[in-house]
Image: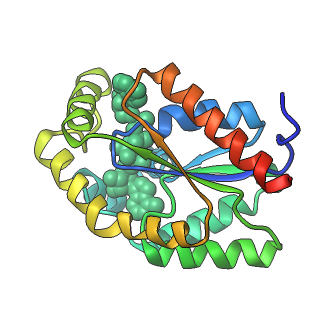
Amino acid sequence: MTTHNAGVRLLIVGPPGAGKGTQAEKIASRYGVPAISTGDIFRANIAGGTELGKRIQELTSAGNLVPDSLTNEIVADRLGQSDAAAGFLLDGYPRTVDQVSALDEVLAAAGTELDAVILLTADTEEVVARLLKRAVDSGRADDTEAVIRYRQEVYREQTEPIIAVYRERGVVVEVDGMGSIDGVADAITAALEQRLAAQSA
Ligand code: B4P
């Protein structure tokens, strides 16, 4: 345990299949904060079979993003729950520049800010291979090759611009996501510890 486990506010960003969800669980448990994944929230809505779930299913199974207005509302509500008051790790959100602004507002209203943005980098062919494997293992509707490749494009067009915004704020911690799961986890931990120590120095 470190001295940085209280009140840490993080987000993890990277291309689909970079391992955000995989690493988010590990980081969140290390820092004792909830991992909040918009992808998981949407899949839970789909599984619930509601009208909202059906609309989300149409969008995500084609590889498109869910509209900002809806996503922002869902995340603001989730961040308002008591378990997120002392810190959180956002996984897969923000995914657009508009979502960055919405998150900024929620954090400003709470008088808090992000401690670090973990950028998980990965090679396109490797992530496509991982997601094709996940398709076999878990059968996700958005894990067909055409949709996987389209989601990489959506990432480049809509999500990559948020990295520049966070780089300008000096909060980005870049980690190579190409190693083994445990190797990547160790690299994230080391990079985060360095960042959080520098911040509190
Ligand atoms: P997500 O659920 O975020 O899905 P993802 O980007 O495909 O997966 P992730 O990067 O988390 O990879 P994972 O750890 O699973 O989004 C799904 C959809 O929801 C989006 O396309 C979009 O439509 C919608 N959505 C989500 N957030 C949104 C937002 N904010 N706004 C609008 N729409 C939004 O890893 C992938 C696979 O690789 C796994 O099988 C894993 O076991 C394997 N793996 C991980 N690390 C590995 C490693 N180091 N080596 C080998 N394999 C590894």
Q: Is residue 48 above or below residue 50?
A: above
Give the residue drawn at x 58%, y 77%: 102
Name the quadrant of the N terminus.
top right
Q: Position of residue 191 (x, y in %)?
A: 62, 40
Question: Where is residue 4, by image quadrant?
Answer: top right
Q: Is residue 44 above or below residue 100?
A: above
Give the residue drawn at x 58%, y 36%: 188
Nearest to the observer: residue 14 or residue 170: 170
Question: Where is residue 82, by image quadrant?
Answer: bottom right
Query: In screen coordinates, is 30 left or right of 130?
Result: right
Q: Position of residue 100 (x, y in %)?
A: 53, 72
Nearest to the observer: residue 118 or residue 89: 118
Give the residue drawn at x 62%, y 30%: 26
Q: Position of residue 65 (x, y in %)?
A: 33, 63
Give the residue drawn at x 52%, y 66%: 167
Question: Where is residue 72, by image quadrant?
Answer: bottom right
Q: Position of residue 126 (x, y in %)?
A: 24, 33
Nearest to the observer: residue 60 or residue 100: 100
Residue 174, visible in the rendered structure: yes
Residue 53, visible in the rendered structure: no
Image quadrant of ligand 1 equals top left
The colour scheme of the drawn protein is rainbow
